[in-house]
Amino acid sequence: MSKKFYITTPLYYLSGTAHIGHAYTTLAADVIARYQKGKGRQVHFLTGSDEHGANIEKVSAQVGKTPAQWTDELADSWQKLWASLEVQHSDFIRTTEPRHEKPVQRVFEILLEKGDIYKGSYEGWYCTPCENYLDPAELVNGKCPLHDCKAEQAREETYFFRLSKYQQALLDHYEKNPEFLSPKSRSREIINFVKSGLQDTSISRSKVSWGIPIPGDPKKTIYVWFDALLNYATAVGLAEKLGLPEGGALSRGRKFDEFWPADIHLVGKEIYRFHAVLWPAMLMALGLPLPKKVFAHGWWTVNGEKMSKTRGNVVNPEDYAREYGVDALRYFVFREVPFGNDGDFSDAAFAQRYNSELANSLGNLLSRTLNMVDKYIGGKLPGDDYKGGELYAALAAHGPAIDAHMEALELDKALDRIWCAVAEMNQAIDRNKPWVMAKENPAGLEPFLLELSAGLRLVSGWLEPFMPETAGKMRAQLTAPRKTGEKMAPLFPRKEAAKPAK
Ligand SMILES: [Zn+2]
């Protein structure tokens, strides 16, 4: 049995609907998953929803629903969103499912027996939206810096995870596996945090009833992060791996060792620490291998401002998908910003890239090439045995660089390279002037047009992970026998720069 390429998004917390930041992570995972599939690898792409904790209890009560009703509705709407954005995940796990809750409880028992979980009492500053105690040094004027919400002094009997025990082992792991903390620009912060000294961390809550009950102490529930992080393992057969009685059924027949360790956990930078510190320490405590890479991308601002409900500038990905098409959205977010950095989302930038790069550079290239193919060479397209000439060889030479960028998760650089090839074809047309060749060098015209068609087929293959629908349309046009004279709809109809209608 061969190890699958296993990629995950974070489990999204179902306290509300999705915005562009969530879509960005999920689309990135989809692009990477499609790319790996295209390379012939067996891919497993996991996403899902994080459904426990005080915030879910609170938001569902506000609308007069039970947490179960609320999370059922939200989980459903999130899954519909992913389908509408052409996301092809292999599995969607909800932390309220027995296949997750049961192995999480078993993990708790195992670590308690082992002494990596122990009972104590905790006193400190608690932020309710974080569902966590904050270090007094993190507070800004007594408020949580992330939520701008006043932290409260709280004290409770609690279970601790012995995180301090893994400080050195984590540092050793970061050192021996430089790819683990990705991108490189974000690794220093984590290493410094771990070096500054890890404290054992509270992993139970007595104030939160909507959660996984602690085995043998059911008045307390498991801290939502300790619960949620384990999804990456429970979704791929941890129940069976741990020898639970109904482990085979809970694991849906998945054999843990075929999937684990994950190849990539994609996360936003605000939750990097949980994934780069707590999660690997939990795996070490369980004696399981660590994921190969934890990659944190940046945040989106909107027209230079932080995105927030109070500002009313939250970007809904569906508005852009409706206005410009799903593929244009998938293209824009990865073209606009180096993957890993922070970026700014603006209507002007979106419209500009749409019109100049999609409608003009790519869309026009395809339509004018096929028009000339019809007009000058009777719709002839390259055959399966096509070898190509100088132009085609130059275009094909971009392939290895695009592959290298995709493997390194440099999604923006891969797109830059693809648009280089597009530009080279446009330049070749302007230089060779096929309409002049038709009169002066008719023998050279057919080979040239065949090179363009074959080059566009390469582009459609490279674009498939980013823009599956566009790639499919291009491929269809460039392979089916042509009915000359048939009018073709433009790939990307030009748009006036306008804010998408809500
Ligand atoms: Zn907070």
Image (cartoon, rainbow, N blue to C red):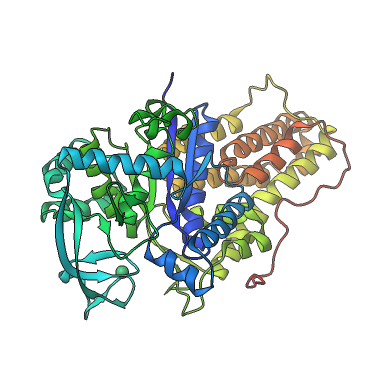
Residue 30, image x and y in percent? 52, 44
Q: Is residue 116 left or right of residue 408?
A: left
Residue 487, image x and y in percent? 85, 47
Q: Is residue 253 left or right of residue 140?
A: right
Q: Residue at x 38, y 41 (%)?
A: 102
Q: Residue at x 28, y 53 (%)?
A: 274
Residue 187, image x and y in percent? 24, 50
Vertical placement of residue 134 versus 450, above or below: below
Q: How many marks?
A: 0
Quarter holding residue 410: top left
Q: Is residue 123 left or right of residue 317?
A: left
Q: Quadrant of ligand 1?
A: bottom left
Residue in front for this viewpoint, 243 or 80: 243
Residue in front for this viewpoint, 102 or 280: 102
Q: Quadrant of the C terminus?
A: bottom right
Quarter holding residue 135: bottom left
Q: Is residue 222 visible?
A: no
Residue 19, image x and y in percent? 51, 63
Q: Is residue 210 visible?
A: yes
Residue in front for this viewpoint, 477 or 442: 477
Q: Residue at x 38, y 34 (%)?
A: 239
Q: Residue at x 27, y 44 (%)?
A: 108
Q: Quadrant of the N terminus?
A: top left
